[in-house]
Image: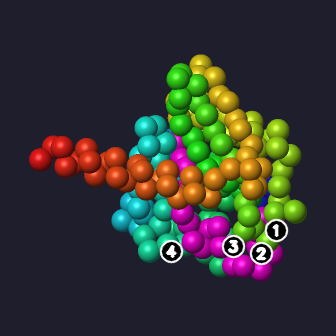
Amino acid sequence: MSTIQDNPCLKCNENQRCCSQLSGLRLSTEEFENNFLNLRDKLSITKDNKIFIVSTIDNGPCPHWELSGCRIYNERPIDCRVYPYEIIGLAEKKRVIEIKYRDSPSCPQKDHLLMPRAEAESLMKTLGQTAYGKSKPVVIKYLKEGKDQSRIFSVVSPLMTIVSNMLKICKKY
């Protein structure tokens, strides 16, 4: 896909819910600064170590989304590029970057959109190394639906980051 017109998501029968209700987008510092830094007033932003986790305020649309598609489609972040694979965990553990992902259970176009897993994993590796350093080894784990608690993890992980940040603020006072 090279242009916004080539975007198969424009055929979505659910109004591109992934973009019209942006929640939990994982970004490197570079991606955040290039695409979202000037939009902070429209976003809920948490930082989990070296990864920015971005959601829109009140579960609204991505600030780059409009009815005709994504305004930054050709420069969109890696987490957007690999969709309908969902990155549900990205963290440094014992000097290794661990990335967990799955197929989106809610994308109605996923049969037409899923890129080969090797290609998606290559992009995810780039995201991990961009965020944590090119010399860091990356371990990528594909989670099959029903084999884990990934839905719970995808909700709990950002909440734990928020609680952790709140505790840090409370300790200052």
Residue, disc 2: 12
Residue, disc 3: 16
Residue type beneath disc 2: Cys
Residue type beneath disc 3: Gln
Q: What kind of element bears circle 1? A: loop
Residue, disc 4: 60
Residue type beneath disc 1: Gln
Q: Which residues are magenta?
A: 4-28
Residue 27 is one of the magenta-drawn residues: yes
Q: Residue at x 77, y 75 (%)?
A: 12
Q: Nearer the viewer, residue 31 or 2?
A: 31
Disc 1 to disc 2, how far (Cα)? 7 Å
Q: Quadrant of residue 113?
A: bottom right
Task: Determine contact: label 3, label 1, CB under 8 Å.
Answer: no
Disc 2 to disc 4, how far (Cα)? 18 Å
Q: How is the image coloured?
A: rainbow
Is residue 170 shown above or below 43? above
Residue 147 is one of the magenta-drawn residues: no
First of labels 3, 4 by sequence position? 3
Q: Quadrant of residue 154?
A: bottom right
Q: What kind of element bears circle 2? A: loop
Residue, disc 1: 109
Q: Nearer the viewer, residue 121 or 165?
A: 165
Task: Determine contact: label 2, label 3, CB under 8 Å.
Answer: yes
Is residue 67 shown above or below 63? below
Q: Residue at x 74, y 43 (%)?
A: 142
Residue type beneath disc 4: Gly
First of labels 3, 1 by sequence position? 3
Is residue 151 shown above or below 127? below
Other residues around mark 4 within 10 Å, as few (<14) / some (14–19) / many (≥20):
some
